[in-house]
Image (cartoon, grey):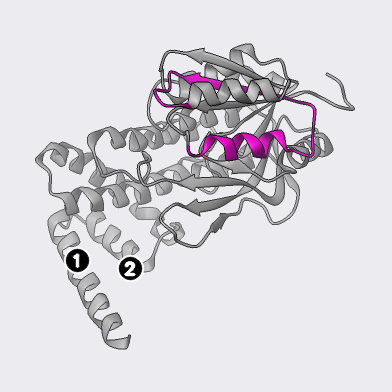
């Protein structure tokens, strides 16, 4: 590896994003760090994206294009990784974009702390027009060891997102993405268990676009239970590191939020998921004081953990929400 100017491979899975792709690729091609290999993976996109990818490759010699049949986000990342040659690896989703100095800053902290992985803070860009938010993982440049990193991950304080990170080449064996929803979680779980330390950059450098049609914000359906299943796997791994309590607490909060959506929808298809979610919440009851959620919801979780039927608990929650709405309406 060249210590002066290591090559960074930036892998961009592309599928049905013709209105966003140019902004994404422009933000990568315009990086202050120039020694980049930019890999656009056309995942069988049915729109104009394949041609747009080829146009970009004709304009910038650092850009190469992989055309493949559709296999999903994880499969596209794997295809890009298979042809990459960089000393470091980064991922960018094709509907997002990054600040001009993102890869320079991520590389700087990797080298400063001799860390195989680095992480930056993230701007959350709401497509619906809500104000931009920030997800902050560090307020100053710093480094954490494996146990500290896993503690934050199992608590839900360090996200599994692939795209706000830089990975040294020796981490590539842990970057194989499964063909499933929430594919980032098992990869991050395995990666953080193997890396000796992670460096954190204090700057917000990645813009994560929240689209209305994304998996995260689509209407609740049984496939989304995959997220809870991944959190259950987190709990199993956390036992080996003495961090089970942190993982159980995080799983309980996510299970409560998912259960609330199911109860609101009242779908028979989703009924079999109710009892496993209630069981997860009961497991988290001993850790209510440490949970990162609203105090009122902690109270509802306590009721669920105390065997109060879920229909009663969420009925009470809806009534309280109605009163708050009426009071706020009167104040306006």
Residue 110, given in percent of the width and then of the height, sits at 77, 35
The verdict on residue 127 being magenta is no
Q: Which residue is mark 2?
A: 296
Residue at horizontal 44 percent and vertical 28 percent from the top? 183
Residue at x 33% of width, y 54% of height: 285
Q: Residue at x 79, y 35 (%)?
A: 33
Report the front residue among 245 and 60: 60
Distance from disc 1 to disc 2, alpha carbons, whole Å, reads 12 Å
- Element at badge 1? helix
Q: Identify the disc placed on residue 135.
A: none
Res 292 → quadrant: bottom left
Expressed as whole percent of the image width and height from the top left, the position of residue 289 reads 43, 61
In the rendered structure, the answer to whether residue 183 lies left or right of residue 38 reads left
The residue tagged 1 is 318
Residue 114 in sight here = yes
Query: Which part of the image, by quadrant, shows the C terminus?
Result: bottom left
Identify the element where label 2 is drawn.
helix
| Magenta residues (range) | 19-48
Q: Quadrant of the N terminus?
A: top right
Location of residue 61 (image quadrant): top right
* Place of residue 177 in the rendered image (x, y in percent of width and height, measured from the top left): 49, 22
């Amino acid at each position: 590896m060249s210590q002066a100017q290591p090559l960074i491979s930036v892998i961009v899975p592309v599928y049905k994003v013709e209105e966003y792709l140019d902004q994404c690729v422009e933000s990568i091609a315009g990086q202050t760090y120039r020694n980049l290999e930019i890999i656009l993976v056309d995942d069988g996109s049915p729109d104009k994206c394949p041609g747009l990818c080829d146009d970009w490759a004709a304009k910038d010699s650092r850009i190469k294009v992989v055309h493949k049949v559709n296999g999903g986000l994880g499969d596209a990342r794997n295809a890009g990784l298979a042809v990459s040659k960089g000393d470091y690896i980064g991922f960018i989703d094709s509907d997002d974009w990054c600040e001009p100095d993102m890869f320079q800053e991520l590389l700087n902290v990797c080298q400063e702390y001799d860390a195989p992985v680095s992480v930056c803070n993230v701007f959350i860009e709401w497509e619906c027009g809500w104000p931009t938010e920030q997800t902050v993982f560090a307020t100053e440049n710093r480094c954490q060891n494996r146990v500290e990193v896993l503690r934050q991950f199992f608590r839900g304080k360090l996200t599994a997102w692939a795209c706000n990170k830089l990975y040294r080449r020796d981490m590539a064996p842990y970057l194989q993405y499964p063909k499933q929803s929430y594919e980032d979680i098992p990869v991050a779980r395995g990666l953080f268990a193997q890396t000796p330390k992670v460096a954190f950059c204090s700057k917000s450098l990645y813009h994560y676009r929240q689209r209305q049609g994304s998996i995260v914000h689509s209407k609740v359906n049984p496939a989304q239970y995959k997220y809870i299943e991944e959190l259950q796997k987190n709990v199993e791994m956390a036992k080996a590191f003495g961090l089970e309590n942190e993982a159980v607490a995080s799983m309980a909060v996510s299970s409560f939020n998912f259960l609330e959506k199911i109860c609101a929808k009242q779908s028979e298809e989703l009924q079999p998921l109710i009892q496993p979610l209630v069981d997860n919440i009961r497991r988290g009851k001993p850790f209510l004081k440490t949970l990162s959620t609203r105090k009122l919801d902690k109270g509802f979780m306590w009721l669920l953990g105390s065997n109060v039927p879920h229909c009663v608990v969420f009925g009470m929650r809806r009534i309280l929400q109605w009163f708050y709405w009426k009071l706020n309406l009167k104040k306006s």
